[in-house]
């Protein structure tokens, strides 16, 4: 399935349009509204969980601790762990520049 998603993403103008739309939204309230319009509650929950995993990993929690805390398998955490080890990942860049710190996010 991942291969299908990757092929679909790379060969679909809608993917690029969606990325461009996200880039154009520079107001937090508009982004929240866009998320609410685009994603189901379950999809938003998955996105929030993914971000929580990154934060937990970055804070030094072990994968086993995170799995127990969120009641998920280690497999879900492995992807995040690999991305945080990649010095060229955008996720690392965001963490290094304080984007994960709620004090840096305008309300």
Image (tube, helix red, strand yellow):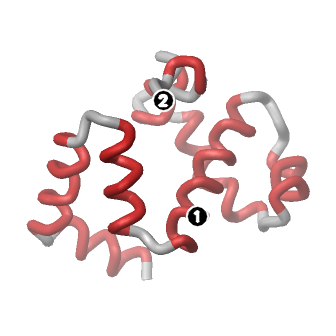
Q: Nearer the viewer, residue 82 or 8?
A: 8
Quarter of the picture containing the N terminus is bottom left
Compare marks 2 and 1 and give the one earlier in the sequence.
1
Q: Nearer the viewer, residue 12 or 52?
A: 52
Which residue shows up at 87% across the image and 52% down it?
Answer: 64
Question: How far apart are the alpha carbons under marks 2 and 1?
Answer: 22 Å
Q: Which residue is mark 2?
A: 107
Q: Going by the image, does 27 lie left or right of 41?
A: left
Q: Going by the image, does 83 lie left or right of 63?
A: left
Which residue shows up at 34% across the image and 75% down it?
Answer: 5
The secondary element bearing badge 1 is classed as helix
Of badges 2 and 1, the one in the foreground is 2
Q: Give residue 97's position: percent from left, percent from top.
A: 47, 16
Q: Nearer the viewer, residue 2 or 101?
A: 101
Disc sitting over residue 37 in the figure: none
Q: Give residue 105's position: percent from left, percent from top.
A: 49, 25
Q: Which residue is mark 1?
A: 46
Q: Give residue 54's position: percent from left, percent from top.
A: 63, 41
Mark 1, Cα crowd under 10 Å, few <14 / some 14-19 / many 20+, is few
Q: Going by the image, does 86 lie left or right of 82?
A: left
Which residue shows up at 70% across the image and 64% down it?
Answer: 75
The secondary element bearing badge 2 is classed as loop
Which residue shows up at 59% across the image and 26% down it?
Answer: 102
Mark 2, Cα crowd under 10 Å, few <14 / some 14-19 / many 20+, is few
Q: Going by the image, does 67 lie left or right of 85?
A: right
């Amino acid at each position: 399935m991942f291969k299908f998603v990757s092929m679909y993403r790379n060969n679909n103008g809608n993917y690029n349009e969606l990325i461009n739309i996200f880039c154009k939204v520079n107001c937090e309230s508009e982004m929240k509204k866009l998320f609410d319009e685009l994603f189901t509650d379950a999809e938003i929950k998955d996105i929030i969980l993914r971000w929580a995993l990154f934060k937990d990993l970055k804070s030094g929690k072990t994968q086993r601790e995170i799995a127990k805390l969120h009641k998920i398998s280690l497999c879900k955490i492995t992807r995040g762990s690999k991305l945080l080890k990649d010095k060229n990942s955008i996720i690392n860049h965001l963490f290094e520049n304080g984007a994960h710190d709620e004090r840096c996010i305008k309300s």
